[in-house]
Amino acid sequence: MFPLLRRVVPVAVLVFAAQGSAWADAKLDVAMKQLAATSGCVACHSIESGKPGPAGVAPIGPAWQDVAARYKGQEGVSEKLLKTVMEGSNPYASHWKGKVSGLAMPPNAVAIQEADARKLVQWILDLKQ
Ligand code: HEC
């Protein structure tokens, strides 16, 4: 029994390590989508770009793939976006004017913990088209 285990376990560990990163990505995707759903974000945002909003108008908030494309690589952007998510956006300085039907994002601090929002924003910024 034990000699067999000694041979099987290292192989299993190797296979698992090779798949580890894809597996971790998939697990993170599931967790972040769940967090977005339970925090109410998905009422206004889709993940994939190009989806219409309710009643055929522009989506209420920008698709998160579009957010990633717009801000990718910008210095300090995740902290800026985190602040906007927690405190809401400025309706007089809209970043997505003409592209979305929502005028501003309300503060989400009632719906999500800052630590969770930080993870979600980082995940959003890492999204690919
Ligand atoms: C009631 C609708 C609504 C909800 C709920 C909502 N958003 Fe938004 N969100 C918007 C709108 C509208 C904008 C566009 C603001 C602008 O034009 O500056 C926006 C913008 C954003 C942006 C980009 C901000 C920028 O400055 O470009 C991010 C990131 C974002 N939302 C994440 C989230 C997350 C995460 C949640 C959930 C915790 C969430 N939103 C919940 C409506 C919403």
Image (spheres, rainbow, N blue to C red):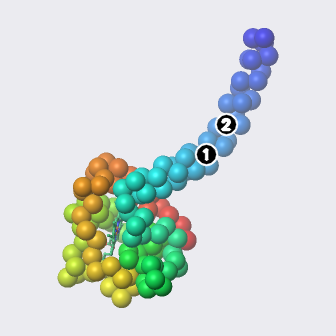
Residue 118 percent across, percent down from the top left: 34, 54
Query: In the rendering, which numbered label is found on residue 16?
Result: 2
Q: Is mark 1 within 8 Å of ligand 1?
A: no
Q: Is residue 79 visible?
A: no
Residue 45 percent across, percent down from the top left: 42, 69
Where, quadrant-wise, is the C terminus in this rendering?
A: bottom right
Q: Secondary structure at mark 2?
A: helix
Residue 72, by quadrant, is: bottom left
Inspect the image, locate mark 1, and give the three-letter code of the amino acid beneath it.
Trp
Residue 19 percent across, percent down from the top left: 66, 43
Q: Nearer the viewer, residue 15 or 102?
A: 102
Inspect the image, locate mark 2, and give the three-letter code of the amino acid beneath it.
Phe
Residue drawn at x 71%, y 26% as measured from the top left: 10
* 16 sits left or right of 90 in the view: right
* 125 sits left or right of 108 in the view: right
Marks 1 & 2, CB-CB < 8 Å contact: yes
Q: Is residue 86 visible?
A: yes
Q: Residues within 10 Å of mark 2 (few under 14, many from 20)?
A: few
* Rendering quadrant holding ligand 1: bottom left
Which residue position holds label 1?
Answer: 23
Residue 24, by quadrant, is: top right
Residue drawn at x 52%, y 79% as measured from the top left: 50
Earlier along the polypeptide chain: callout 1 or callout 2?
A: 2
